[in-house]
Image: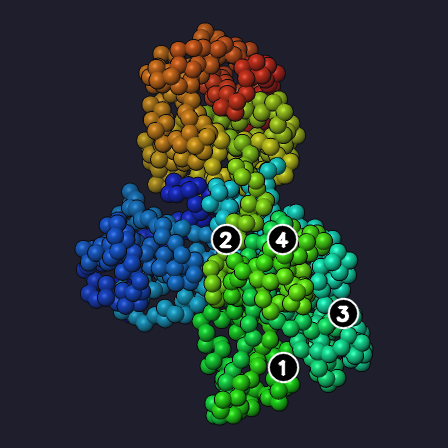
């Protein structure tokens, strides 16, 4: 029986957006150490040695010490096992190819209970990693065996199944570098870059600019060649055939050697090169037929295979292929030689993370090429005999800097003729640094949705920033893909604030989406009647292509349960510190804890955005120091200390002068909306009239932050009708 009882995972929650821990998604775990609360790491005999033997790279973790070996130092000094679990999970993610460095563990008000979080790019992967890390940690505690390699393998399977492929990940990373937000739209590689009306979409290396007609043309190899030939692009002569006999007849017409390939294949599947005899050509026809809807016979072009990536009319990268050979030793079979001499190359693998594929004898083209040389997988080549194993499909050597301008012109023309904004253009040439026609080279295919891996991680040569090239193609310099997002955090009148801000934005001519407790709205149309102050509703607005401005109501519970629906916002409003009584499950027991939660709304304000804070509460006013952008304070009391100091520094504020709202910039004041009329309309709608002043001031401040003028704001307030809802009269209104 184990010496120590298992750590209990009380609650596991995925925070999908900015939260109290970080800007990025995390998995939050509430865990109970139980009896292990009395056994920090240095009191468990052999634990530290067992743990570091299982995960030697823990020595690289800095932890709070801030340098290599920091976590090991903490283990030796004595740290609690919740903290150890955090680092175990992080290291397992690193080993599985999803590197992360962020994690935190904090005690709660209950003895032995901790909240632990770690960076989680994908929820499924994070949960699997947590389960594996939990088992590993308890095995180290109780001196039980644990297969780390198998655990990493299981995690890696989930990474491959559920996370972005390397091409999509590179594009997303490039967008993030430009501070362009992204939203994943399915469980695969369909991703939205930007928000609302300014969004663009990618599906791996296809974009919403990639024409379906162009894809269809690219998929028809014969049609592609016809179009290219008409514009003078060098292409090999070819004939579409429908039988092995027709393939041989076509080869006789063209003249051997020839290539036989599918008319609509990709990735080199079913392509057999340098065919010279009837037997070879008829066998190659049968192989090609299995990989496409038709077969084409083409003139064989001598030279090396090349793949050039064209993005937005420019060559972004180029890679050269090579043939794969084995050399006999007089003892080993062809299969053994392939494994030892080719597949042992660490650059080769079965997933798209590897720049080169492993060669398999169940590949019909490989088998056919071997048969043409008189070999099978069981044959034993004599010592020194070179055997050709694969003629194409090994494009992984970067040659971008060698591309001749005339070659670049030809491939960009080819992409343009087909109509593809992103294309993989395959050509054969002896020397890519020379024009094609002079050397008898030719373009053999134009492909939609090309793989980026040969350029991101070439087997040889310089990696190319092709993800950045695609992002720069979709977004002009200076464009962020962002629309104005207004976040309203708090409980007092926040639904009415959100509705009024949305109304004012609507009057300014912007198609505005609104998610609040009163429902989900597009413009003035309600599309969902139930409470929509949540992550899901906010996300729905951000993916809507028609929306030009978004207003989203949040409260502390939303931030703690899900995180914010948006990564950053143009305007962030914090109104009050009420509602803490409903947050006990998050270990919130007093209002003084709420600033740490609601600061999330201010943390995400863009550096060219505005934080709007209620100055009447000093704890809220103090959040101004956390805002990356400008801050507008509001308060009904114009003599409020924070407001006076803010105006004294020449900054913007919104307050009252009598029953009139005034926009203040330093000592100057501009009259704006009328409070009395607004209060009357709130009363008529059964909305708490005591909140009217604060509601109006917050909304006016947000509208001012959106650069709306005082005349429009005044007119908008006068025409705003606070509509009663099923929850009318509640504090949220």
Picture residue at 79% right of the left edge, 70% below the top: 240
Label 1: how many residues lie within 10 Å, few (<14), some (14-19) or many (20+)? many
Q: CA distance from mark 3 to mark 4?
A: 25 Å
- The residue singled out by tag 1 in the image is 369
- Name the residue nearer the viewer: 288 or 648: 288
Picture residue at 34% right of the left edge, 70% below the top: 146
- Per the image, label 4 sits on a secondary structure element best described as strand
Between disc 2 and disc 3, whose residue precedes? 3
- The residue singled out by tag 3 in the image is 238
* Residue 668 horizontal side relative to residue 115, left or right: right
Point out which mark residue 465 bears: 2
Q: Position of residue 708 (x, y in %)?
A: 55, 20
Between disc 2 and disc 4, whose residue precedes? 4
Is residue 470 among what the camera can see?
A: yes
* Residue 306 horizontal side relative to residue 344, left or right: right
Picture residue at 40% right of the left edge, 32% below the top: 628
- Name the residue nearer the viewer: 435 or 13: 435
């Amino acid at each position: 029986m184990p010496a120590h009882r298992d750590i209990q995972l009380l609650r596991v929650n995925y925070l999908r957006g900015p939260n109290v821990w970080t800007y990025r998604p995390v998995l939050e775990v509430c865990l109970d150490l139980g009896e292990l609360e009395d056994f920090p790491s240095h009191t468990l005999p052999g634990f530290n040695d067992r743990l570091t033997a299982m995960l030697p790279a823990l020595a690289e973790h800095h932890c709070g010490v801030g340098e290599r070996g920091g976590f090991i130092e903490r283990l030796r000094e004595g740290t609690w096992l919740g903290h150890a679990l955090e680092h175990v999970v992080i290291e397992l993610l690193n080993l599985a190819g999803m590197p992360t460095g962020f994690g935190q563990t904090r005690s709660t008000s209950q003895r032995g209970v901790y909240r632990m979080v770690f960076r989680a790019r994908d929820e499924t992967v994070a949960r699997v990693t947590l389960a594996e890390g939990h088992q590993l940690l308890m095995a180290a505690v109780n001196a039980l065996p644990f297969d780390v390699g198998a655990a990493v393998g299981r995690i890696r399977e989930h990474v491959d199944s559920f996370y972005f492929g390397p091409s999509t990940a590179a594009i997303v990373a490039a967008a993030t570098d430009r501070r362009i937000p992204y939203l994943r739209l399915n469980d695969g590689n369909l991703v939205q870059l930007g928000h609302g009306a300014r969004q663009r979409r990618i599906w791996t290396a296809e974009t919403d600019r990639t024409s379906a007609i162009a894809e269809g043309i690219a998929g028809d190899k014969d049609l592609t060649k016809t179009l290219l030939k008409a514009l003078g692009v060098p292409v090999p002569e070819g004939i579409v055939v429908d039988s092995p006999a027709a393939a041989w007849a076509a080869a006789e017409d063209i003249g051997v050697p020839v290539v036989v390939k599918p008319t609509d294949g990709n990735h080199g599947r079913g392509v057999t090169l340098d065919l010279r005899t009837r037997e070879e050509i008829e066998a190659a026809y049968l192989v090609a037929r299995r990989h496409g809807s038709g077969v084409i016979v083409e003139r064989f072009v001598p030279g090396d295979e090349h793949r050039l990536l064209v993005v937005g009319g420019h060559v972004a990268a180029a890679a050269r292929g090579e043939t794969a050979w084995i050399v006999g030793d007089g003892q080993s079979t062809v299969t053994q030689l392939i494994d030892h001499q080719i597949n042992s190359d660490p650059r080769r693998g079965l997933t798209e993370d590897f720049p080169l594929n492993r060669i398999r004898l169940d590949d019909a083209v490989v088998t056919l090429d071997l048969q043409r040389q008189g070999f099978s997988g069981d044959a034993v080549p004599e010592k020194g005999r070179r055997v050709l194993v694969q003629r194409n499909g090994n494009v992984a050597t970067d040659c971008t800097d060698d591309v001749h301008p005339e070659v670049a012109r030809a491939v960009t023309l080819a992409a343009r003729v087909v109509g593809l904004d992103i294309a993989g253009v395959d050509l054969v040439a002896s020397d890519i640094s020379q024009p094609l026609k002079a050397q008898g080279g030719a373009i053999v295919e134009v492909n939609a949705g090309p793989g980026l891996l040969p350029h991101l991680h070439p087997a040889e040569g310089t990696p190319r920033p092709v993800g950045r090239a695609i992002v720069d193609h979709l977004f002009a310099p200076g464009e962020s893909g962002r629309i104005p997002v207004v976040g309203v955090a708090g409980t007092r009148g926040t639904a009415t604030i959100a509705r009024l801000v949305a109304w004012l934005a609507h009057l300014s001519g912007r198609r505005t989406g609104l998610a609040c407790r009163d429902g989900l709205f597009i413009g003035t149309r309600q599309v969902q009647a139930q409470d929509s102050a949540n992550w899901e509703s906010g996300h729905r607005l951000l993916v809507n292509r028609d929306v030009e401005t978004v207003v989203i109501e949040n409260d502390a519970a939303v931030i703690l349960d899900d995180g914010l629906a948006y990564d950053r916002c143009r305007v962030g409003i914090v109104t009050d510190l009420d509602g803490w009584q409903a947050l006990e499950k998050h270990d919130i027991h007093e209002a003084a804890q709420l600033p740490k939660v609601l600061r999330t709304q201010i943390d995400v304000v863009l550096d060219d955005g505005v934080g709007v804070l209620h100055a009447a509460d000093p704890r809220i006013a103090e959040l101004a120091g956390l805002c990356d952008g400008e801050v507008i304070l509001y308060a009904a009391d114009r003599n409020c200390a924070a407001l006076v100091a803010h105006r004294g520094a020449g900054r913007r504020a919104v307050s009252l002068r009598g029953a009139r709202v005034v926009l203040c910039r330093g000592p100057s004041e501009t009259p704006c909306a009328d409070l009395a009329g607004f209060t009357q309309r709130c009363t008529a709608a059964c909305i708490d009239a005591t909140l009217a002043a604060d509601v109006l001031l917050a909304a006016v401040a947000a509208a001012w932050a959106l650069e709306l003028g005082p005349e429009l704001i005044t007119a908008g307030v006068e025409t705003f009708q606070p509509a009663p809802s099923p929850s009318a009269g509640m504090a949220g209104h």
